[in-house]
Amino acid sequence: IINIFIIMDKNESKIKPVEELGIEWQAPEFIYYKKDVSWYWLSLVISVILLALSIWQRNFLFVVFIIIGWFVVVYSTSRKPATWHFKLNEKGFEIALPKTKGSSASSKFYRFTEIDGFDIHDSEADKNYKELFLKIKKRFSPYLKINFPSAKEEEIKDFLIKYIPKEEYNESLADSFSKLIRF
């Protein structure tokens, strides 16, 4: 998409063309899986088994960890995803996070020099979205997974291939496990 804007300064009569090349979209932070009552009961049963095991082992710190962990999992699974705004342009990739309670809206920008490559995977949970994997040049969080509308796949792939290479990335074990348990 090429947008050409004409900016006129009040003090000058010169016309200044500004060219902006990019792709924008909005997508949920993550794909939400609706959980039924049996999912919560199963998580409670697993937690109780782990609690019994940790009490039998007399590992009381693990007991506290399991209890806190169960409450965090139940809270996290009931949370609906926020809608994020994404923008690709010739300089890089921007993620605009929504405004939440107690904080203002913020954004994170990745230059193409900070990205090693990309890959696109189908989303098993929602056929309306695909997953864009970006390999970031960071030691502790090297992959960034972003949802995007399936209709924009070719447009995004054609745009990115101009700036970074397309490489094959396999899903991590944590991603595979979270899809298996529908987290």
Image (cartoon, helix red, strand yellow):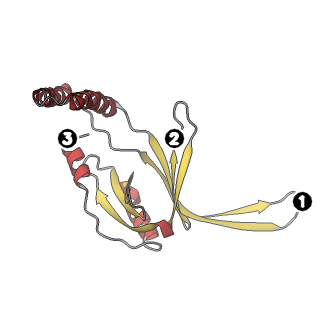
As shown in the figure, which amino acid type bears the numbered disc 2?
Pro
Q: Split into 4 quadrants, where in the image is the C terminus?
A: top left
Residue 25 lies, in percent from the top left, at: 48, 52
Residue corresponding to mark 1: 11
Name the element at disc 1.
Answer: loop
Coordinates of residue 128 in the picture (x, y in percent): 33, 49
Q: Sequence order check: which comes first, mark 2 or mark 3? A: 2
Looking at the image, residue 106 sits to the left or right of residue 48; the answer is right
Query: Are circles 2 and 3 on residues that touch, CB within 8 Å?
Result: no
- Count the marks: 3
Answer with mark 2 or mark 1, whichever residue precedes in sequence: 1
Residue type at numbered disc 3: Ile
User: Can you tell which mark lies on residue 98?
Assistant: 2
Marks 3 and 1: which is nearer the front? Answer: 3
Kindly indicate the quadrant of the structure image that contains residue 103.
top right
Within-10-Å neighbours for mark 3: few <14, some 14–19, many 20+: few
Q: Are marks 2 and 1 in contact (CB under 8 Å)?
A: no
Of callouts 3 and 1, which one flags the residue occurring earlier in the amino acid sequence?
1
Tell me, for residue 121, which label it has, or none. Answer: none
Horizontally, residue 18 falls left or right of residue 44, namely right
Query: Quick one: SS at disc 3?
Result: loop
Taking the spot 40% from the left edge, 67% from the top edge, the residue there is 157
| Residue at (72% x, 68% y) in the render | 17
Q: Looking at the image, which is closer to me, 80 or 21?
A: 80
Give above or below for 6 relative to 53: below
CA gap between label 3 and label 1 equals: 62 Å
Q: Amino acid at mark 1?
A: Asn
- For the view shown, which residue lies furthest in the right direction? 11
Kind of element beneath mark 2: loop
Q: Nearer the viewer, residue 171 or 161?
A: 171
The residue at which mark 3 appears reads as: 181
Would you call the spot at circle 1 few (<14 residues within 10 Å), some (14-19), or many (20 or more)?
few
